[in-house]
Amino acid sequence: VLLQASGGGLVQPGGSLRLSCAASEPILSNYHMGWFRQAPGKERQFVAAISWREANTYYTDSVKGRFKISRDSATDTVYLRMDSLKAEDTAVYYCAVRQARSSTPLSASGALYDSWGQGTQFTVSS
């Protein structure tokens, strides 16, 4: 599965942005989709994940209540809606897909994801 992330740019603190990640082929019901980010000079960090069939979600603590991951099964696209953005949210954001087995819990480990998109950059700055 090839993934194409988009939606990056420049946004002011407190603003909102939505990232999109389109898959090149249908996402199967047992797959998980995730968003990760990497800020300059830092390691890649898990942001959020969603199960394709049940739409169960999982977030890292620092984005809970501000970010929302969702998916559109009709277009095989996963979204990351981000509100109340902070400077520390500045990073390159990557989407990833995991070919999980049925009932497998969502995971924050990037090593478990099978395919990655190219990343989209956004900056939170006034």
Image (spheres, rainbow, N blue to C red):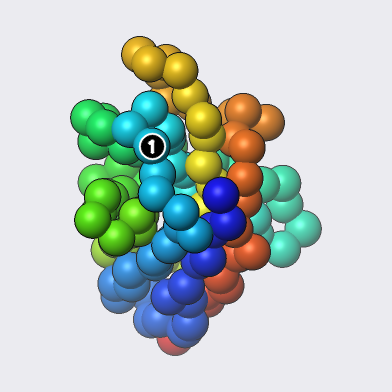
Q: Nearer the viewer, residue 109 or 3?
A: 3
* Other residues around mark 1 within 10 Å, as few (<14) / some (14–19) / many (≥20): few
Image coordinates for residue 44, horizontal then vertical, percent? 66, 47
Residue at 29 percent of width and 60 percent of height:
75
Taking the view exactly as shown, the residue that stands out farthest to the front is: 25
Residue at 43 percent of width and 75 percent of height:
7
Q: Which residue is mark 1?
A: 28
Q: Is residue 4 above or below residue 43?
A: below
Q: Is residue 28 above or below residue 104?
A: below
Q: Which element is circle 1 on?
A: loop
Residue at 62 percent of width and 37 percent of height:
114
Q: Amino acid at mark 1?
A: Leu
Question: Quick check: can you spot residue 30?
Answer: yes
Instruction: Please state if 33 lies on the left or on the right of 56 as rendered.
Output: right
Residue at 48 percent of width and 24 percent of height:
100
Question: Quick check: can you spot residue 93?
Answer: no
Taking the view exactly as shown, the residue that stands out farthest to the right is: 41
Q: Nearer the viewer, residue 88 or 76?
A: 76
